[in-house]
Image: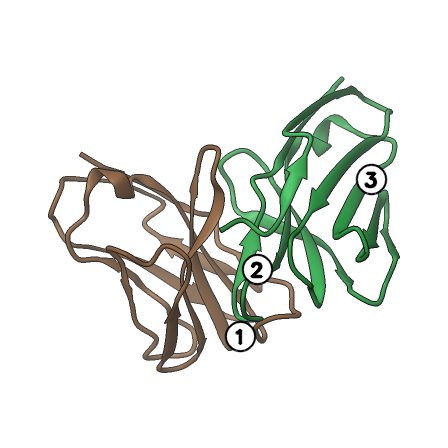
Chain colours: A brown, B green
Amino acid sequence: EAQVTQNPRYLITVTGKKLTVTCSQNMNHEYMSWYRQDPGLGLRQIYYSMNVEVTDKGDVPEGYKVSRKEKRNFPLILESPSPNQTSLYFCASSLIAGEETQYFGPGTRLLVL
Amino acid sequence: SQQGEEDPQALSIQEGENATMNCSYKTSINNLQWYRQNSGRGLVHLILIRSNEREKHSGRLRVTLDTSKKSSSLLITASRAADTASYFCATEGDSSYKLIFGSGTRLLVRP
């Protein structure tokens, strides 16, 4: 089944404790992206990747890192999480950037205390 | 920055009625997409309309695009309780690699 998976789905952590949210897609998509969703703000793009080893900042990249060592994986790293990073995070992928449908993962709900 | 803005923010209708949501955007686009999100879950792509298209249909969905007014509408006909969800429009940001979502319309379909 074609899908985007994220792990973990739920995470409670404390300020400053490094964490990684994994994202994997099995559709051989070139483009992958991370979003965060907050009430009243809709979805905002954090980082995106056009292909392996090619990443770039979205609208809200501060406090986040990403890597794209393999085509199928695009982990989101929070080196030192803070409470303002409490949010619902979505990974998405598409065959190519721009004019293609994006397929979304189920989301990761993160609470930073 | 938000490229797309949906209107209304919330909509409550009776099952069987039609639901219309609007999206306005600011800059020129190559295409516009509509997505649905059930509460707290991932977004699901509904339809993509290109800038040279004026109307597109998919099942009970009808999307229109007016590039002169920089606006799009999503019509759901004969609504069902299962259509209860948030609906988002999305357009490219300042590059085709960025997808910018509006803040969404919350649709409630009452049985």
Q: Where is residue A76 shown, x and y percent of the image?
A: 31, 60
Q: Among all residues in the image, which is located at the extreme left?
A: A16
Q: Chain of mark 3?
A: B
Residue found 55% across the figure and 72% down from its top: A27
Q: Quadrant of the N terminus of chain A?
A: bottom right
Q: Residues within 10 Å of mark 2 (few under 14, many from 20)?
A: many
Q: Amino acid at mark 2?
A: Tyr
Q: Where is residue B12 shown, x and y percent of the image?
A: 72, 20
Residue found 55% across the figure and 60% down from its top: B99
Name the side, left or right, on which A41 lies relative to A113.
right
Q: Which residue is mark 1?
A: A29
Q: Is residue A74 above or below residue B81?
A: below
Q: Chain of mark 2?
A: A
- Cβ–Cβ below 8 Å for labels 2 and 3? no
Q: Which residue is mark 2?
A: A103
Q: Which residue is mark 3?
A: B75
- Cβ–Cβ below 8 Å for labels 1 and 2? yes
* Tag 3 and tag 1 share a subunit: no
Mark 1 and mark 2: span between their CA atoms?
Answer: 10 Å
Q: Where is residue B91 shown, x and y percent of the image?
A: 63, 58
